[in-house]
């Protein structure tokens, strides 16, 4: 209940009259978590190596590794944003999906506080045929597939902690399935 109330407060200005939040989850492009891990880890290793050659000491290595990891994560975020825009028309690396009794809303997120910043896409529930959440796989999050009536699908992934199954179940209840 508290999670749903927090979501409703976060997106209140985008809700229509008498529209109610049912569930929500954050998601990124398919394989986004894997690529962020790889680029962040690779950046950390490169930063560590560069800082070790430039300056000796544990502090230099720690700073170099941290800076390298941050650069890797930023590069991954830029790539994810580009892929999401090209494949789904969403201008964000990570989206906050909010299911209401009328629509599925997708918001870009703030880097600072994980709040909804801008409405990236909205889809009427009648335009969605299913929301399917797959099983966790090694090194990836839950695959989430939102099938649309036009025959296309939005393919994302969402971490277990985001409870994407709750979103899929709320959709089934909302459409009577």
Image (cartoon, grey):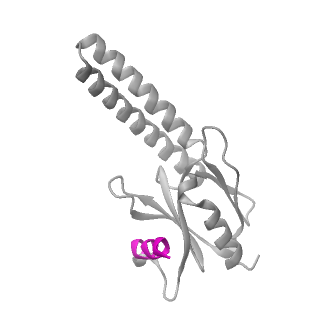
**Image quadrant in which you'd find residue 123:** bottom right
| Quadrant where the image shows the C terminus | bottom right
- Residue furthest out toward the bottom: 18
Q: Is residue 38 visible?
A: yes
Residue range in magenta is: 1-11
- Our reading of the magenta stretch's main secondary structure is helix
| Whole-percent x, y for residue 34 in the image | 56, 37
Q: Considering only vertical position in the picture, is 138 above or below 121? A: above
Q: Is residue 89 visible?
A: no
Camera-side residue: 161 or 75? Answer: 161
Q: Which residue is at 44% across, 41% downward?
A: 78
| Whole-percent x, y for residue 144 in the image | 65, 55
Q: Considering only vertical position in the picture, is 40 above or below 100? A: above
Camera-side residue: 135 or 96? Answer: 135
Q: Tell me if residue 5 is in the magenta stretch.
A: yes
Q: Which residue is at 60% across, 80% downward?
A: 101
| Whole-percent x, y for residue 51 in the image | 28, 18
Q: Considering only vertical position in the picture, is 63 above or below 130? A: above
Q: Considering only vertical position in the picture, is 65 above or below 125? A: above
- Residue furthest out toward the front: 58
Camera-side residue: 93 or 149? Answer: 93
**Image quadrant in which you'd find residue 151:** bottom right
Q: Which residue is at 63% across, 50% downward?
A: 142
Counting every numbered tag in the picture gives 0
Q: Tell me if residue 7 is in the magenta stretch.
A: yes
Q: Which residue is at 41% across, 22% downward?
A: 45
| Whole-percent x, y for residue 53 in the image | 29, 10
């Amino acid at each position: 209940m508290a999670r749903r109330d927090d979501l409703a407060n976060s997106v209140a200005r985008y809700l229509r009259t008498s529209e109610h939040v049912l569930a929500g989850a954050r998601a990124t492009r398919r394989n986004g978590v894997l690529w962020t891990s790889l680029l962040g880890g690779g950046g950390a290793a490169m930063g560590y190596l560069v800082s070790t050659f430039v300056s000796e000491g544990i502090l230099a290595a720690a700073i170099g590794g941290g800076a390298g990891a941050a650069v890797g994560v930023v590069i991954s975020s830029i790539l994810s944003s580009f892929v999401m825009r090209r494949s789904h028309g969403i201008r964000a690396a990570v989206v906050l999906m909010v299911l209401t009794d009328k629509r599925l809303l997708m918001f870009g997120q703030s880097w600072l506080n994980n709040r909804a910043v801008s409405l990236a896409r909205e889809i009427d529930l009648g335009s969605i045929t299913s929301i399917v959440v797959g099983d966790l796989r090694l090194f990836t999050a839950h695959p989430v597939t939102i099938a649309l009536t036009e025959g296309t699908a939005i393919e994302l992934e969402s971490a277990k902690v985001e409870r994407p199954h709750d979103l899929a179940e709320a959709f089934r209840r909302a459409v009577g399935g």
